[in-house]
Amino acid sequence: MSEKRKSFTLYDVLLIVAGFFLVILLWQLRSLLLTLMISVVLAATITPFVDALEKLRFPRWLGVILFYLGFIGVLIIIGLLIGPSVSEQIQRLARRFPIYLENLGIAAENLAARVGITQLETIEQFFDLQALTNGLFRSSQKLVLRSFGVTFGILGAAINLILAVVISGYMAAGSKSLIRGLVSVFPQPWDERFEAQVIPISRRMGGYVQGRVLVSLILGIVITLALRVLGLSEFALALGTIAAFTNVIPFVGPVLGAVPALIVAIPQGGLTVVWVLLLFVIIQNLESYVLDPLLVGNTVKVHPFYQLLAVLGGTQVLGIIGAVIVPPWVAGITVVLENLYLRPKLLKEQGMGNREQAIVRSS
């Protein structure tokens, strides 16, 4: 009995030591792991387009090249069409932003005076724009630094992004051989089971990214046109672009995109602010109850609560990059959880229930 206890204890110690060194190894390879995570998401996103080109008798490697060339071409065309206007509006907005913040402070003081708060010290303590701005700036800076910290700086992030694009191309072009080589590591019947999950995982991960990009593009166009109608045409294109980029991040992004537009609307008067606020409330509901269920939810099939946890957890660990790439990974993991655990468990429970009913009927 004592010998078994000693050997068991030694085995536990070895497992703990091995786990400790594994954690250290993964930490040292964190930049490579992040690159691989991004590569898998990109590969899952472009695979449907590569599959479509393959049906047209294009080799997969050529389909990957054509997709990326087409994507770069579209970005260049969009940049030539609206890039100069967006850049000029954003620079002008950055120069005027302190003035808009000052107007926001004046509006807050006027509102407080109407409510009955007349002590300026109380208003300044309650609504300290300088402290609020500095706090937001520091929070944003921490998120950006956390994103770059995983990849060892801006240069490392740029190199990792290029590597991710290249690796994703290899993954999409040689997906069949890669999958066969990966699942061959597992014993039977798990190799066949895991191989059967690859396509559903890829569809969910790719569908999530495709859906979010499409939703963000639609909302960016709608917000730009609506702000023009509401009298903010001077910065409509810049504000719509900001809202489109921030909307890629679920839940938090729409709020971040609404803040600059509301601040810019203050000099136009209270009625304009109300209309802009109403616009973003409508946009948020349109996204939550129409676009997301139609373009994202039907493909991803992940409860919004778990998507929110994925965004918050990804942001906490990896910064802005984590908020974008962790949710599609959660969507992919749910496929494995559903098909290899929850569904067999449900079938087993139903089988046991049917047997119990048969026993009751026979007795």
Image: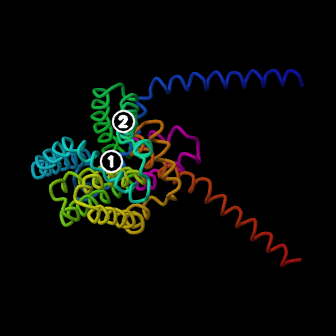
User: Which residue is nearer to you in this view: 76 or 62?
Assistant: 76
> Under tag 2, what secondary structure?
helix
Q: Which residues are magenta?
A: 178-204
Q: Residues within 10 Å of mark 1 (few under 14, many from 20)?
A: some
Q: Is residue 186 magenta?
A: yes
Residue lying furthest bottom: 361
Asked if residue 266 lies left or right of residue 302, the reply is left
Q: Which residue is mark 1?
A: 105
Q: Main secondary structure of the magenta part?
A: helix
The spot of residue 77 in percent (x, y) is: 12, 51
Seen from the viewer's position, the closer of residues 254 and 300 is: 254
Q: Position of residue 83 (x, y in %)?
A: 13, 47
Residue 325 lies, with reference to residue 283, above or below; the image says above
Residue 135 part of the magenta-drawn span: no
* Farthest residue, direction front: 118
CA distance separating discs 2 and 1: 15 Å
**Marks 2 and 1 in Cβ contact (< 8 Å):** no
Asked which quadrant contains residue 152, the reply is top left
Residue neighbourhood size for the residue with mark 2, other residues' Cα within 10 Å, grouped as few (<14), some (14–19), many (≥20): few
Circle number at residue 48: none
Query: In terms of image quadrants, where is residue 159?
Result: top left
| Marks 2 and 1, the one that precedes in the sequence | 1
Residue carrying label 2: 134
24 horizontally vs 226: left or right: right
Nearer the observer, 232 or 55: 232
Quarter assignment of residue 350: bottom right
Q: Amino acid at mark 1?
A: Gly
Q: Is residue 329 left or right of residue 19?
A: left
- Foreground disc of the pair 2, 1: 1
